[in-house]
Image (spheres, grey):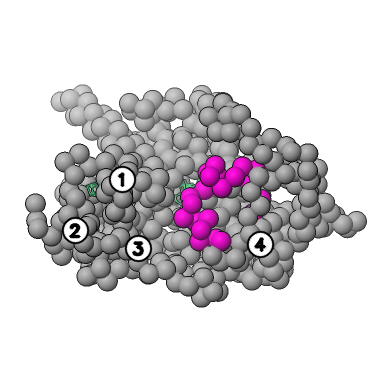
Amino acid sequence: MAEKMLQFTKVSRAMPAKRPPVERASDFGEIYAGYTPEAAEAQASRCSQCGVPFCQQGCPLQNNIPDWLKLAAEGRMEEAWRVSSATNNMPEICGRICPQDRLCEGICTIEQSGHGTVTIGSIEKHITDTAWAEGWVQPIKPMRERAQSAGIIGAGPAGLAAAEQLRRKGYQVTVYDAYDRGGGLLIYGIPGFKLEKDVVERRIKWLEDSGITFRFNTRIGVDRSLSELRAEHDTVLIATGVYAAKDLKCPGSGADGVFAALEYLTASNRVGLGDVVEEYESGALNAAGKRIVVIGGGDTAMDCVRTAIRQGAKSVTCVYRRDRANMPGSQREVQNAEEEGVVFEWLANPESILDTKAGKVKAVRASRMKLGEPDASGRQAPVKTGETFDLKADMVIKALGFDPEDLPALFNEPALTVNRWGAVRIDYATMMTSLPGVYAAGDIVRGASLVVWAIKDGRDAAEAMHKAMKAADAAAKVAAE
Ligand code: FAD
Ligand code: SF4
Ligand code: SF4
């Protein structure tokens, strides 16, 4: 082990510099700067190179974290990048947006000893940002081209990871997406202050340069059918994510000025990408000068409140029915939101949306809650205290989560089996759906989850698709002899 390592008693944990709240609230740039090379090396040297690296167990991709930390500490960044990118298709993206406090960093051994976790995500970001800057990331050149082809439905992280893995093996890969750009929620869901869009666009361009074909503005089930894709390709992957917004079930929820979170975030991201968005131009989806109430306590809600701040809202309040300790969103994001001026109404549940005679939203009436007995999920269930209060609002954003769309109906494939929530069922040993040769990965299988899990699923599906195509190819050759 290099003497460089085990420095956690001498070198304090230091995240990259965070821009001051007033400055960052006025634009959509990322809030964290990058490390300098010296700082990245020093932070990596804090790792104690555990014999049993818990951090690796906490990473869904089982990244070889201690190995690339050691290489980074020794200034061997290109080797660090090679190790890091061997198990992760988008390390610079995961380094930015994984909730590390719940994954790799949450169980870092030196955190348990009170020294503060190794800043794994920020170092991972530094390694791959350096690789891009130095020109080490070159387009894929497969060892050999194969005639077999894969059709991938969805250009989100699950579809993109699968596309890359298959292309590396020499398959002809076409990715179909309903949107006009690739990236899925990376491009239109997650705001720029967490993940700047050129980081995503750079990946898509690199995949194109690697020989992957993208067919945008193509909604499968509408513009092309699943059966056409199955006839055209040797294998098909469904990686369509989950987009049916859970609705607010209370009187007045249809009032003018009540919007779904993704409608709001997509409009904001499009504006940031230079598109003209009519609903933004008209002011309907622009928070400027308005009192905004966001309902929900997950990461989508955090992205909405912080977007509203940046659009120049008069006030932004987040209403959530449990308390801070029991919210599903990352604590780091709540802290960032508070710093930027968001007010949280914990233990508050919307009872009705009050509107004007013209049907325009004017307030949210909420019940004050307290935490009762644990429910089926093991979390304490919120129960009403009997007290209500009103929050004035010009715009209400519903951020209550997402369900899968009805894919058997959309794809006109009743034989595609889904679970009771509508997520596509797969055999986890083969990643295959009930339709032969059709696989599925990402949120459409798991329900709304995380980017890193979508990448993991995409990689697993690609491996299974490769095995099946290789076997089919071998069988065809035997038959032809
Ligand atoms: P998606 O990213 O949803 O991509 C699916 C793609 O399929 C889309 O491009 C869509 O247009 C396309 N598609 C859908 N239907 C069709 C069709 N019929 N035909 C053709 N194309 C179709 N995760 C994190 O790890 N960190 C975060 O900070 C984070 N923040 C988030 C913030 C928001 C606002 C949201 C909504 C989610 C966030 N997530 C975050 C979750 C993460 O974005 C998802 O888990 C991940 O993107 C899922 O990847 P996916 O490839 O399965 O689906
Ligand atoms: Fe941590 Fe995510 Fe990177 Fe894994 S992919 S090491 S969980 S930041
Ligand atoms: Fe290093 Fe922490 Fe992983 Fe141990 S758990 S190998 S200290 S990053």
C-alpha distance separating marks 1 and 4: 36 Å
* Dot label at residue 15: 3
Dots 3, 4 in contact, CB < 8 A: no
Taking 239 as reference, is 294 left or right? right
Q: Amino acid at mark 2?
A: Gln
Point 54% across, 65% down: residue? 339
Taking 251 as reference, is 109 left or right? left
Which tag is nearer the camera, tag 2 or tag 4?
2
Q: Quadrant of residue 317?
A: bottom right
Which tag is nearer the camera, tag 1 or tag 4?
1
* Dot label at residue 112: 1
Taking the magenta stretch, the answer to whether it contains residue 331 is yes
Please tell me whether mark 2 sits on a helix, a strand or a loop: helix
Residue 388 vertical position relative to residue 384 in the rendered view, above or below: below
First along the sequence among labels 3 and 2: 2
Dots 3, 2 in contact, CB < 8 A: no
C-alpha distance separating marks 1 and 3: 18 Å
Please tell me whether mark 4 sits on a helix, a strand or a loop: strand
* Dot label at residue 7: 2
Using the image as rendered, state which of residue 255 and residue 303 is in the foreground: 303
Measured from the top left, where is residue 236 in percent x and y? Answer: 39, 37
Taking the magenta stretch, the answer to whether it contains residue 48 is no
In this view, the residue farthest toward the right is: 357
> Which portion, as a residue range, is magenta?
318-338
Which tag is nearer the camera, tag 1 or tag 3?
1
